[in-house]
Amino acid sequence: MVPRPRNKSNKGLPQNLYLDDRRGTYRYRRPTDGKWFQFGTDRMKAVDAAKQLNLAFMQGSDLVGTVLGESAELFTAFLTHYEEKVLPPRELAPGTLGLYAVHFRRFRKHFHGKAVDQITIRMIAEMLDELTPRTANQCRALLIDIFNHAAAKGLCPDNPAANTISRIEKKARKRHTIEGLKAIREKSPAWLQNAIDLALITAQRRTDILAMKFEDQRDGYLYVIQQKTAKASDAAWIRFKVTDELQRVISRCRDNIVSPFLVHRRPDRKKQKQAETKEHWTKIEERYLTRAFKEARETADCYKGWKEEEMPGFHEVRAMSLHLYKKAGKDGQKIAGHASEEMTKNYQKDHAEVVWSEAIPDLDISEIAG
């Protein structure tokens, strides 16, 4: 934006420095948020200070600290501290950390060069307004936690994110139909078909489906620890009885690719960086599964007339599974890993011995899987 022409009183003064004709004093307007700072009556000192400030702002230096004579920590630097020191002890699921990483990149770009105590409610609100309600609420919750930690260290006087208002989320996604999911499965590669079948049989989340290993099948059971709820729910430890239906799916997972994971694939090309971060080179990342499912859905073209935001993804396969279990007159609560009051506590003092919840995955999925 081109700055307004300077009036007669301010001609010859550096940008952002103004003369108050009424008082005969100089004042500096901080360009990032318009806040004013009184610089007294000494023209030479005011000009010198304004030039230094303008240079600091141009270089992206410690903005507030330059004005106030204090050292202020950049938000991006504190965000790194939050990632490296605050998050690890929480032992969050890989999927959650991956989602946070996306939000962190957004924060770094939007608040680049800003000090922690320089970020205002308006800055945060403007960023959130550009996002969908769901993403905006996720970012808001994360920023509230970040600024709580920053305030606890004295880096900002209050929490600007907490003063924003959460958005109303309207559930737009529709559920899969049997015909639709069948069409998607037919257009899916073999590994994705296996993932869909496991989701139908076990009603587990994407993260837990991709974490299932062949070695988890023992003594007639398939053992699963739900990553999302392992720290909050007693029902997160599930052992699925290997029924005929489940065994057929597990058997289809065995192919000519040597992999520890039930759902796996041979990548088009191995990338050294990915190979170093993955548990195994055949392991499928959650985002890749989501992308592949979307591609199969688009190829199947099974939900004509539906809006993009209404299109069900892989996550909705779990809802389909629970619906089919209920329709068949079976209890889907233990299958899904929903806690009940009668369940024995797994996380009592000193980590008592884990008590596995037993589930019988005997859903007939032949109508979809053939």
Image (cartoon, grey):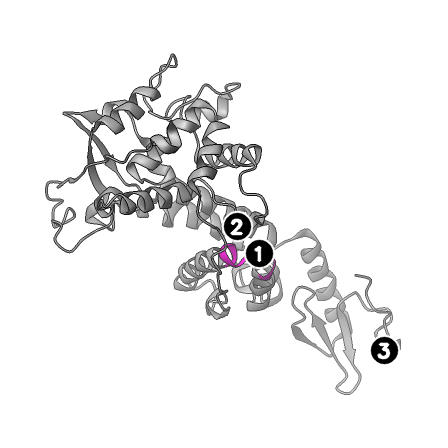
> Residue 1's x, y, as percent?
79, 61
> To which residue does mark 3 refer?
9
Write the residue at 23% across / 44% down.
236
At label 3, which amino acid type do we have? Ser
Name the front one of labels 3 and 2. Answer: 2
Q: Is 310 situated left or right of 318 in this image?
A: right
Mark 2, mark 1: which one is toward the viewer? 2
Q: Residue 276 location in percent, x, y? A: 43, 24
Real-space Cα separation, disc 3 to disc 2, in angstroms: 60 Å
Does residue 164 appear to the left or right of 2 in the view shown? left
Numbered disc 3: secondary structure: helix
Quadrant position of residue 7: bottom right
* Secondary structure mainly formed by the magenta segment: helix
Q: Secondary structure at mark 1?
A: loop
Would you call the spot at circle 1 few (<14 residues within 10 Å), some (14-19), or many (20 or more)?
few
Q: Mark 3 or mark 2: which comes first in sequence?
A: 3
Q: Amino acid at mark 2?
A: Glu
* Foreground residue among 33 and 303: 303
Q: In terms of sequence position, does the residue under pointer 1 or pointer 3 come before the other?
A: 3
3D distance between C-alphas at marks 2 and 1:
18 Å
**Which amino acid type is shown beneath numbered disc 1?**
Leu
Q: Residue at x 15, y 56 (%)?
A: 341
Query: What residue range appears in magenta?
Result: 129-136
Q: Which mark is residue 103?
A: none
Magenta stretch: includes residue 120 = no
Element marked by disc 2: helix
Report the mark closest to the observer, 1 or 3.
1
| In the foreground, 140 or 59 | 140
Residue 150 lies, in percent from the top left, at 43, 60
Q: Indicate whether 326 appears above or below 26.
A: above
Task: Give the residue at mark 1.
Answer: 131
Q: Residues within 10 Å of mark 2 (few under 14, many from 20)?
A: some
